[in-house]
Amino acid sequence: MPIHVLPDEVASQIAAGEVVERPASVVKELLENALDAHAAQVTIAIEGAGRRLIEIGDDGSGIPAEELPLAVARHATSKLFRAEDLFHIQTLGFRGEALASIGSVSRMTVTTQAEGAASGSRLRVEGGRLMGIEPAGTPQGTVVRVEELFFNVPARLKFLKQDATERQQIDGLVTRYAIAYADKRFRLFEDSRPVIQTSGNGSQREVLANLYGVDIARQMLEVNAVEDELRLSGFITPISITRSNRREITFFINGRWVQDTPLTQAVLQAYHTLLMVGRYPMAVLFLDVPPETIDVNVHPAKAEVRFRNADLIFSGMQRAIRRALLAYTPVPELVPQQTAWTGGRAAVEDGWAEAPEGNGGNPTTWETGKVEEGETAPTAAPAQTQPGLPGGELPLLRLVGQIGLAYLVAEGPDGLYLIDQHAAHERVLFERFLGKRARNPNAAIPAQALLEPVTVHLPPLSAQLLNDQLPLLDRLGFEVETFGPGTYLVRAIPAMFTGGDPAGAVRVLVEDFEEDETPLQGEIEARLIARVCKRVAVKAGQTLSVEEQRALVRDLEACKSPRTCPHGRPTMIHLSVDSLERQFGRKGAR
């Protein structure tokens, strides 16, 4: 096949594919253009999760009428003049690709009036073709209206995710920029409904309160550090506030939002030994470095950067975050002796580490040894391992008592049982909930009205998920109603959860969803129920009366799958009589 030059239309669509991946990509490019134009207010309107309409208006410097056709041409920009400027970038945009790429895969209208101009202009672009310019009466600034995104490349539409996921991406993007540019006023509307509104008064903590709730904003720790060429500022959560994924760790470098795995690792290393394995902090961090020390031209969407002195940046960030944490979080002394077992999991400070393989995951051979920071539990000396728990059901157990405010000790006909009270209560609540659903699948779970409604504040992306699922929550026994943007009133919870935390039970339904999950829509009820059970179950450190201990053991005995919690963690450890005799040297010792 002979080599040939691609038609302009095909070349434009290829270039657009690098810049415009999804509706959130359009919002990002236009939002950054507005900030580069020194806008004080940015308004974003979305319809159909961005497929039908994305409109972003600002009150920035605007575009002169004579430059408007050039603004939508490929590789046309006012922010870059020569190759050397690539290493002194001080604006968010610089390639001159955004408007050209967006216009090639949509029906785009640009309405603008430059500062000092007597009137404005309007330019229409359809599938990369200019449809003409006309005068327009408009205030200073620019409004870009993007309709029918990917109308001319339907194959790209098929790769978009469900509306809830696409809205979540947009909400998360605007949320991040609203925090980073707290001196700008942001307004986001989705299907004519206000989702995000900030005052623009410059207070980042106030923006955090609007987006994440007053409680979280109040507890976030401030980071401020200057070290060599590095200036770091922002907010991190204390060890009491965590998430199940890294999604809430956000970086802005010289005002640009970037996604950088090494930087994320630097944050996680600062929290090392302070968080449970599998739990992650929330962080919004702003890194300022000389422009010549970073390369921002390494990713089509400008989402990644390269550092000239990467090790210096990462170590400086880690030290600054660790100092902030230690200033607010007293570090417990390392206990020199740790009890561990060779299979399953072993406790390492207040987290979990996988123990060495070789025992078939059977957590029954014990030893005592020192566990150093960052190491997994030591392997036991060679010993006879005992069989796992007999059968699927438990024998009748006799309660002995509670130890460490976390475990119940019980005696059975075949040995000793150590029961994790939190995991056991999770299993009991889970099977009780599913039992009610199985007996009458179409009936709502009995609800218990609260004496006073409990207020729950959710960030925009979580609020949208909850709005879509209020009927499902009603069937599960939650009575939740909207009470303003991002705010809800919990009036009732399932009767079996009485005494639990209503606000926490609702939050856990919409927290921690990964991007590629289908939030709630594709979740089976069992998974949602398991989330709530984990939240409302008794916790380690909670004192139980003898009656409560005995009731928990009896309820666990009645479960169909008593040996694990709904998330797969073991509820108990079994020490057989045979194993005890071997450990004490009684077996065969003559």
Image: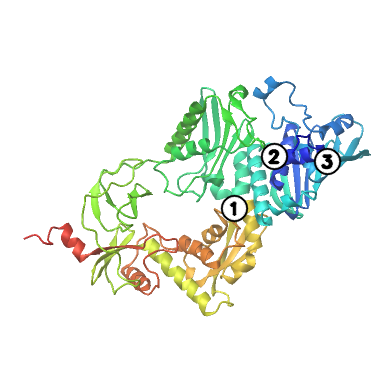
* N-term mark: 1 or 2: 2
| Residue 39 seen by the camera | no
Mark-to-mark CA distance, 3 and 2: 16 Å
Residue position for label 3: 128
| Count of picture labels | 3
In which quadrant is the N terminus drawn?
top right
Q: In this view, does 237 lie above or below 487?
A: above
Dots 1, 3 in contact, CB < 8 A: no
Label 2, secondary structure: give it: helix
| Residue 268 seen by the camera | yes
Hey, what amino acid is under mark 1?
A: Asp
User: Which residue is painted at 79% across and 33% down in the image?
Assistant: 74
Q: Which residue lies furthest to the bottom in this view?
A: 439
Residue position for label 2: 18
* Front tag of 1 and 3: 3
> Left of 229 or right of it: where is 336?
left
> Left of 362 or right of it: where is 28?
right
* N-term mark: 3 or 2: 2
Question: Residue 489 lies in what quarter of the image?
Answer: bottom right
Q: Where is residue 134 in the image (x, y as percent from the top left)?
A: 93, 39
Residue position for label 1: 516
Name the residue nearer the viewer: 420 or 199: 420
Label 3, secondary structure: give it: loop
Mark-to-mark CA distance, 1 and 2: 20 Å
Q: Which residue lies furthest to the left in this view?
A: 590
Q: Where is residue 398 in the image (x, y as percent from the top left)?
A: 26, 72
